Protein backbone atom coordinates (compact mmCIF):
# COMPACT_ATOMS: atom_id res chain seq x y z
CA UNK A 1 0.00 0.00 0.00
CA UNK A 2 2.87 2.40 0.68
CA UNK A 3 3.95 2.14 -2.97
CA UNK A 4 0.51 3.28 -4.17
CA UNK A 5 0.33 6.03 -1.58
CA UNK A 6 3.67 7.37 -2.73
CA UNK A 7 2.61 7.28 -6.37
CA UNK A 8 -0.64 9.10 -5.66
CA UNK A 9 1.15 11.76 -3.61
CA UNK A 10 3.74 12.21 -6.35
CA UNK A 11 1.01 12.63 -8.97
CA UNK A 12 -0.90 15.08 -6.79
CA UNK A 13 2.11 17.30 -6.17
CA UNK A 14 3.90 16.92 -9.52
CA UNK A 15 0.95 17.85 -11.70
CA UNK A 16 0.84 21.55 -10.71
CA UNK A 17 4.61 21.75 -11.22
CA UNK A 18 4.21 20.38 -14.73
CA UNK A 19 1.43 22.85 -15.46
CA UNK A 20 3.52 25.79 -14.25
CA UNK A 21 6.55 24.54 -16.18
CA UNK A 22 4.60 24.93 -19.40
CA UNK A 23 4.66 28.75 -19.11
CA UNK A 24 8.28 28.85 -20.17
CA UNK A 25 7.54 27.42 -23.61
CA UNK A 26 4.28 29.27 -24.30
CA UNK A 27 4.25 32.57 -26.17
CA UNK A 28 3.72 35.57 -23.90
CA UNK A 29 0.17 36.26 -25.07
CA UNK A 30 -0.98 32.68 -24.49
CA UNK A 31 0.68 32.44 -21.06
CA UNK A 32 -0.91 35.66 -19.84
CA UNK A 33 -4.35 34.52 -21.01
CA UNK A 34 -4.16 31.13 -19.30
CA UNK A 35 -7.17 30.65 -17.01
CA UNK A 36 -5.18 29.61 -13.91
CA UNK A 37 -8.19 29.80 -11.63
CA UNK A 38 -10.13 27.35 -13.76
CA UNK A 39 -7.09 25.08 -14.02
CA UNK A 40 -6.78 24.91 -10.24
CA UNK A 41 -10.50 24.25 -9.89
CA UNK A 42 -10.36 21.39 -12.40
CA UNK A 43 -7.22 20.04 -10.78
CA UNK A 44 -9.05 19.95 -7.43
CA UNK A 45 -12.08 18.23 -8.94
CA UNK A 46 -9.85 15.70 -10.62
CA UNK A 47 -7.91 15.02 -7.43
CA UNK A 48 -11.15 14.55 -5.47
CA UNK A 49 -12.17 11.73 -7.77
CA UNK A 50 -8.67 10.38 -8.40
CA UNK A 51 -7.55 10.08 -4.78
CA UNK A 52 -10.92 8.83 -3.54
CA UNK A 53 -10.96 6.15 -6.26
CA UNK A 54 -7.36 5.11 -5.53
CA UNK A 55 -8.34 4.63 -1.88
CA UNK A 56 -11.36 2.57 -2.92
CA UNK A 57 -9.31 0.45 -5.33
CA UNK A 58 -6.85 -0.35 -2.56
CA UNK A 59 -9.60 -1.10 -0.05
CA UNK A 60 -11.77 -3.26 -2.28
CA UNK A 61 -8.78 -5.26 -3.47
CA UNK A 62 -7.56 -5.87 0.09
CA UNK A 63 -10.92 -7.29 1.18
CA UNK A 64 -11.34 -9.21 -2.06
CA UNK A 65 -7.98 -10.89 -1.68
CA UNK A 66 -8.63 -11.85 1.90
CA UNK A 67 -12.21 -12.90 1.18
CA UNK A 68 -11.36 -15.28 -1.63
CA UNK A 69 -9.71 -17.65 0.81
CA UNK A 70 -12.78 -17.63 3.04
CA UNK A 71 -15.13 -18.23 0.10
CA UNK A 72 -13.07 -21.21 -1.03
CA UNK A 73 -13.45 -22.76 2.44
CA UNK A 74 -17.05 -21.66 3.11
CA UNK A 75 -18.89 -20.87 -0.15
CA UNK A 76 -22.12 -20.16 1.74
CA UNK A 77 -20.52 -16.94 3.08
CA UNK A 78 -19.97 -15.49 -0.42
CA UNK A 79 -22.75 -12.89 -0.09
CA UNK A 80 -21.41 -11.60 3.21
CA UNK A 81 -17.84 -11.48 1.89
CA UNK A 82 -18.94 -9.56 -1.20
CA UNK A 83 -20.88 -7.12 0.98
CA UNK A 84 -17.73 -6.46 3.03
CA UNK A 85 -15.66 -6.09 -0.15
CA UNK A 86 -18.05 -3.46 -1.52
CA UNK A 87 -17.93 -1.23 1.57
CA UNK A 88 -14.55 0.45 0.87
CA UNK A 89 -15.76 1.23 -2.65
CA UNK A 90 -18.17 3.90 -1.49
CA UNK A 91 -15.38 6.41 -0.89
CA UNK A 92 -14.65 6.59 -4.61
CA UNK A 93 -18.28 7.51 -5.15
CA UNK A 94 -18.04 10.35 -2.63
CA UNK A 95 -15.16 11.90 -4.55
CA UNK A 96 -16.92 11.48 -7.87
CA UNK A 97 -20.13 13.08 -6.58
CA UNK A 98 -18.24 16.17 -5.38
CA UNK A 99 -16.50 16.47 -8.77
CA UNK A 100 -19.83 16.12 -10.58
CA UNK A 101 -21.38 18.79 -8.36
CA UNK A 102 -18.62 21.14 -9.46
CA UNK A 103 -19.13 20.29 -13.14
CA UNK A 104 -22.92 20.68 -13.02
CA UNK A 105 -23.18 23.67 -10.64
CA UNK A 106 -20.35 25.78 -12.03
CA UNK A 107 -21.37 25.65 -15.70
CA UNK A 108 -20.98 29.40 -16.34
CA UNK A 109 -17.46 29.28 -14.90
CA UNK A 110 -16.50 26.23 -16.94
CA UNK A 111 -17.89 27.70 -20.17
CA UNK A 112 -16.00 30.96 -19.58
CA UNK A 113 -19.09 33.16 -19.12
CA UNK A 114 -18.02 33.97 -15.55
CA UNK A 115 -14.28 34.56 -15.06
CA UNK A 116 -12.51 32.77 -12.22
CA UNK A 117 -9.53 34.46 -10.61
CA UNK A 118 -6.49 32.49 -9.51
CA UNK A 119 -7.41 33.08 -5.85
CA UNK A 120 -10.92 31.75 -6.46
CA UNK A 121 -9.45 28.73 -8.25
CA UNK A 122 -7.19 28.03 -5.28
CA UNK A 123 -10.16 28.32 -2.92
CA UNK A 124 -12.07 25.83 -5.07
CA UNK A 125 -9.05 23.54 -5.01
CA UNK A 126 -9.12 23.73 -1.21
CA UNK A 127 -12.81 22.79 -1.15
CA UNK A 128 -11.96 19.45 -2.78
CA UNK A 129 -9.25 18.54 -0.27
CA UNK A 130 -11.46 17.26 2.58
CA UNK A 131 -13.20 14.63 0.44
CA UNK A 132 -10.00 13.71 -1.41
CA UNK A 133 -7.88 13.19 1.69
CA UNK A 134 -10.46 11.53 3.92
CA UNK A 135 -11.63 9.11 1.24
CA UNK A 136 -8.09 8.30 0.14
CA UNK A 137 -7.11 7.37 3.68
CA UNK A 138 -10.33 5.89 5.06
CA UNK A 139 -10.97 3.24 2.39
CA UNK A 140 -7.80 1.22 3.08
CA UNK A 141 -8.40 1.44 6.83
CA UNK A 142 -11.99 0.37 6.37
CA UNK A 143 -10.65 -2.56 4.36
CA UNK A 144 -8.44 -3.55 7.29
CA UNK A 145 -11.50 -3.63 9.53
CA UNK A 146 -13.40 -5.69 6.95
CA UNK A 147 -10.46 -8.06 6.55
CA UNK A 148 -10.29 -8.57 10.30
CA UNK A 149 -14.05 -9.12 10.22
CA UNK A 150 -13.57 -11.95 7.76
CA UNK A 151 -11.78 -13.82 10.54
CA UNK A 152 -14.86 -13.31 12.71
CA UNK A 153 -17.08 -14.63 9.91
CA UNK A 154 -14.86 -17.67 9.49
CA UNK A 155 -15.62 -18.61 13.09
CA UNK A 156 -19.29 -17.59 13.11
CA UNK A 157 -21.13 -16.51 9.94
CA UNK A 158 -23.88 -14.85 12.00
CA UNK A 159 -21.55 -11.97 13.01
CA UNK A 160 -21.81 -10.12 9.67
CA UNK A 161 -23.92 -7.32 11.15
CA UNK A 162 -21.32 -6.56 13.80
CA UNK A 163 -18.53 -6.54 11.22
CA UNK A 164 -20.47 -4.16 8.97
CA UNK A 165 -21.14 -1.87 11.95
CA UNK A 166 -17.43 -1.75 12.79
CA UNK A 167 -16.54 -0.99 9.18
CA UNK A 168 -19.22 1.72 8.97
CA UNK A 169 -17.59 3.55 11.88
CA UNK A 170 -14.47 4.08 9.77
CA UNK A 171 -16.53 5.32 6.84
CA UNK A 172 -18.07 7.99 9.05
CA UNK A 173 -14.96 10.10 8.61
CA UNK A 174 -15.04 9.80 4.83
CA UNK A 175 -18.65 10.96 5.03
CA UNK A 176 -17.59 13.95 7.15
CA UNK A 177 -14.99 14.90 4.52
CA UNK A 178 -17.65 14.56 1.83
CA UNK A 179 -20.06 16.80 3.74
CA UNK A 180 -17.46 19.50 4.37
CA UNK A 181 -16.49 19.56 0.67
CA UNK A 182 -20.18 19.60 -0.28
CA UNK A 183 -21.01 22.56 1.96
CA UNK A 184 -17.84 24.48 1.04
CA UNK A 185 -18.56 24.01 -2.65
CA UNK A 186 -22.16 25.15 -2.29
CA UNK A 187 -21.34 28.14 -0.09
CA UNK A 188 -18.57 29.34 -2.40
CA UNK A 189 -20.80 28.98 -5.48
CA UNK A 190 -22.87 31.98 -4.44
CA UNK A 191 -19.85 34.28 -4.19
CA UNK A 192 -18.63 33.32 -7.67
CA UNK A 193 -21.88 33.10 -9.61
CA UNK A 194 -23.67 35.61 -7.38
Image (cartoon, helix red, strand yellow):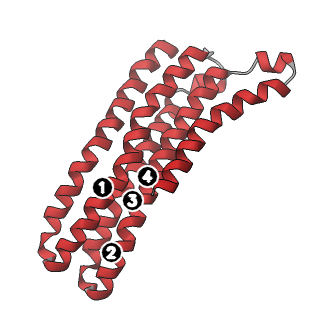
Binning the other alpha carbons within 10 Å of mark 1 as few (below 14), some (14 to 19) or many (20 upward) gives: many
Sequence-wise, the earlier of marks 4 and 1 is 4
Residue under circle 2?
67
Residue 59, numbered circle: 3
Real-space CA distance between mark 3 and mark 4, rounded to the nearest whole angstrom:
6 Å
Residue 55, disc: 4
First-in-chain label (2 vs 3): 3
As measured in the structure, the alpha-carbon distance from the residue carrying label 4 to the one carrying label 1 is 10 Å
Q: Are marks 1 and 3 in contact (CB under 8 Å)?
A: yes
Position of residue 9 in the picture relative to residue 113 (left or right): left
First-in-chain label (2 vs 1): 2
In percent of the image, x 59 and y 22: which residue is there? 109
Q: Quadrant of residue 35?
A: top right
Q: Position of residue 107 (x, y in %)?
A: 57, 27
Q: Regarding mark 4 in the picture, which secondary structure is present there? A: helix
Dots 2 and 3: beta carbons under 8 Å?
A: no
Amino acid sequence: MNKYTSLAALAAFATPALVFAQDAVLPETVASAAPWGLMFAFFGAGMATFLACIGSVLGVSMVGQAGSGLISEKPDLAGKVITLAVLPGSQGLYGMVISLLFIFNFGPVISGEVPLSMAQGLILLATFLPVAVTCFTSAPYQAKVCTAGLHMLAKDGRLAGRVITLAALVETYALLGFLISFFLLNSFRGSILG
